[in-house]
Amino acid sequence: MRLTVRLVDIAARGILLHHNDAKSLGVLAGDRIVISSPVTGKATVDYVETTGTLIDQGRIGVYHHTNEQLTLTENEVVEVRVADRPVSLDYIKKKMEGEKLTREDIRAIVADIVQDTLSPSEITAFVVSSYINQLDMDEIESLTRAMVETGDQLSFHAGPIVDKHSIGGVPGNKISLIVVPIIAASGLLIPKTSSRAITGAGGTADLMEVLAPVEFSASEVQEMTIKTGGVIVWGGATNIAPADDKIIIQEYPFKIDQIGQMIASVMAKKFAVGADVVAIDIPVGKYCKVHTIEEGKKLARQFIDLGERLNMRVECALTYGDAPVGRAIGPKLEIKEALSVLEGSDSPRSLIQKSCVIAGIALELAGKANRGEGANLALEILRSGKALKKFLDIIAVQGGTPDVSSEKITVGEHFYTVRADSTGYVIDLNNHSLITIARTAGAPADHGAGLYLHAKHGTSLSKGDPIFTIYADRKWRLEKAIEEARRLRPVMVEGMLIDRVPNVREWVPGRSRNLE
Amino acid sequence: MRLTVRLVDIAARGILLHHNDAKSLGVLAGDRIVISSPVTGKATVDYVETTGTLIDQGRIGVYHHTNEQLTLTENEVVEVRVADRPVSLDYIKKKMEGEKLTREDIRAIVADIVQDTLSPSEITAFVVSSYINQLDMDEIESLTRAMVETGDQLSFHAGPIVDKHSIGGVPGNKISLIVVPIIAASGLLIPKTSSRAITGAGGTADLMEVLAPVEFSASEVQEMTIKTGGVIVWGGATNIAPADDKIIIQEYPFKIDQIGQMIASVMAKKFAVGADVVAIDIPVGKYCKVHTIEEGKKLARQFIDLGERLNMRVECALTYGDAPVGRAIGPKLEIKEALSVLEGSDSPRSLIQKSCVIAGIALELAGKANRGEGANLALEILRSGKALKKFLDIIAVQGGTPDVSSEKITVGEHFYTVRADSTGYVIDLNNHSLITIARTAGAPADHGAGLYLHAKHGTSLSKGDPIFTIYADRKWRLEKAIEEARRLRPVMVEGMLIDRVPNVREWVPGRSRNLE
């Protein structure tokens, strides 16, 4: 069928047909058609939406993102036909039926996700099917490889390449801002791609963006890493494992944490940047993705197993996840806290301790420190000021202004301190509520917004003592956040490292002890 | 947040925000926001799409169907806030986890489907979850009741009310055009809602639409039924069990036939029109939804069980499904064939036989005929000419021209006859291929398009004898269909009724025999 183009000013993919043309073509809303231009020879597949009024019969509405591929002009005539049904739908159906998917099946599904051949609903069907009929390790490996193959990859001549990952869910987890500079200062390469907050008060990429641009192509990430030893960029801009974001967005309404997909997602990014060694931080706690140490150990073994299949050395630390890391939550508050640690502050202890444990694992895996000595080496690099210098270099290479210090960071001008209404010890803390308050105050979009905790676990409070302060860039946001805060009783517990897999250790600054 | 309206000329529901406003509001693409107008006080919930270019910061793009509810004007200022997460998502998650849903859970899900509170992806998650973790009979009953309660219902003072349903998949299944007039002519009421073809060459509503309008409200259906005894309308226009279409559309890409949802879908429509007795036609065959007699019996028992829970008397006929019913496939061809039977033709036998068996079941259930005598009574009504008269009345009451006859129906002007290229008996027939050819020829959108079969099972063909003729309204469509037809070897088997549940019988015109 030949139809006349009408360009539609909508920032999405899509095709709009008149009901009668759709019927004549034999397609329903949601079906796929192939549109091809006899002028340019370009063709693409896209979904049909139908209308009885907005497009005349004989016309085809082409949305903005679809036309980015086709570069059609208004009133051009295009050829339209029904697209073949993607074979990947059969593989998704296969998973629905409880069968095991082959590497080729999964590659087809992932390729169709990346190319927008599958609709959001169809991706949801894949997500739900592999949530109910869990992926086994062969399928997880296939998914990981497929995610890597369908995106850009880095390749370094020198090695070993280091990477780290923290499973999300713990507020204030700004440790990458300290771990990456420590690793880079040790002479290793760490091309760190981070995420933005989806449900949190700020992902590492949201924090870093306060100081420098974070959107780069894979090849820019590679060049900057070679130059400086490390970067902290937003993974979403790199086209590294691009299928991942499209899968995660479908999990979001249901708060699905499909373990297999999560492992594949993490490891695909590590594999794609060429990592040889990977330190993984698995927070354990009642508000975390992992609720018990047993679950944490099982997850750690899966990461390690998959690492072996992909020829990466992986070690995991089970960390305490029921309390925020450090005292600050929200972009500028966290940046300020991380900078103060890099500048030599000896508090907050939980932040220093956790950063050095994770950096230490990587240093040991990469051969920079003996077993059990990595965290001490990390602390040494931190205290030497080399990590601070490296962090400023990273800011500079990414195009930010390296003239920063914790003192110069100004947080939200509107603030309010919540105080104890009775005397006693802090005994519980709801991470979800803290995040909600910080988000209500404007984090992460309002950089100055967030929370600062004055009291942590073990703190004895008298009536009237400050518990936490809410910061906001906008007054009405502060008021909303105060309302939210009236429902909250904060509690905090110190000591971050519960367990480490494959080794069980405990570490405190200045002391080395291996409990194996 | 307050934003200025920009009306967007797109025939869909949706809201377009600038990235920065979305971030500031704390929503991602796909999240729900509440938009309310301080001018009119109207409010609605809708999904967000985001853009960096097409909408300025501070503006909100409102799509056409969303604005049908809000009636905003260009440049009006609206209030926008994050919508609460629908609690039905938790119930869908519950089904994902393999738990049983309560009546209240299912009611919440169905209500949110009907009100467009759930996105297509979220509906898919429900479909896939209840496909993998099959609904039990309690859940099927809850789903049926919820579908009924969230739509319009009919209520008649007289009774019994009759309904019939054929499980789809068999081409040429125009029996409703004969069954409905027979039942109405017997003095019973049959408010028949039918579907349009999704993957077939024509649903009953597509056929009837050639003769009369088929889009009516539930109350119009009720009035017309009281007046004439029966109607044949499109269910999609009535707002009877409106959740059903929204569920089915999500099953379509995967060709999911979720048995529980299918049973609920059929029975909800029967329950909503106030049916007391229901005859269900279950075609069994290799190209049908039901492949074996055992499966068919199991399905029949589920229909009967659900009927008992809803206080409807249900009886099912397992029918032969490997061949088309009659010889005609495609709107006008089928109308012509059905009219000729109503006018007194004694062929095609398969069509007469099947129509009388299904009508006979209904007549028996409604007490118009003794057990085992229903089909004979149906045939009597058919041969008396009363059914023809009633059919013309139905056309008239729906606003069509009752001045029709099989002779006056003109089929596609372009046609081509496929002939036997060797001598022998017809031994197999691929229904899927027949449908594909009919659709390629233009059915159901082109009313004159379709197929007419000259040979059925047992037919001995000499080389050069006609097997079937393809009809089309447009020449290029005919050519495409001929191409498709070159791949087909047609085969046909006669005798439609395999089995009947709860009774096993065999029936041939003019003879009554009960094999119980």
Image (cartoon, coloured by chain):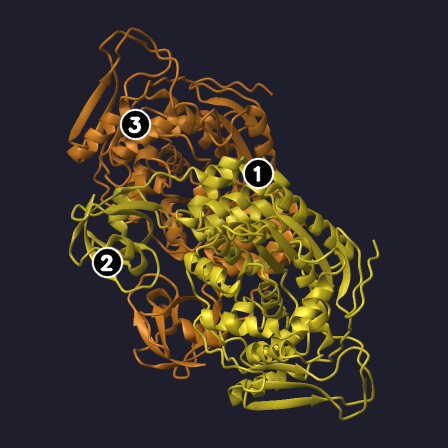
Chain colours: A orange, B yellow
Q: Name the residue under label 1.
A: A303
Q: Mark 3 points at which residue?
A: A328
Q: Do the residues labelled 3 and 2 touch (CB within 8 Å)?
A: no
Where's residue B202, x and y in %? 56, 72
Kindly report which numbered mark, 1 or 2, lies closer to the viewer in this rendering: 2
Residue B509 figure quarter? bottom right
A284 versus B471 height, above or below: above
Q: For mark 2, name the chain.
A: B
Q: Can residue A409 be seen in this view?
A: no
Q: How dense is the environment of label 1, judged by Cα within 10 Å: few (below 14), some, or many (20 and up)?
A: many
Where's residue B324, x and y in %? 69, 73
Nearer-the-camera pick, B240 or A338:
B240
Do marks 3 and 1 share a subunit?
yes
Nearer-the-camera pick, A455 or B273:
B273
Query: SS for tag 3?
Result: strand
Q: For mark 3, name the chain.
A: A
B329 versus B369 height, above or below: below
Kind of residue indicated by mark 1? Phe
Q: Do the residues labelled 3 and 1 touch (CB within 8 Å)?
A: no
Nearer-the-camera pick, A323 or A99:
A99
Query: SS for tag 1?
Result: helix
Kind of residue indicated by mark 3? Ala
Q: Name the residue under label 2.
A: B55
Q: Residue at x 32, y 31 (%)?
A: A436
Q: Which residue is drawn at 24% across and 42% down?
A: A402
Kind of residue indicated by mark 2? Ile
Residue reaching furthest to the bottom: B464
Q: Distance between the residues labelled 3 and 2?
A: 35 Å
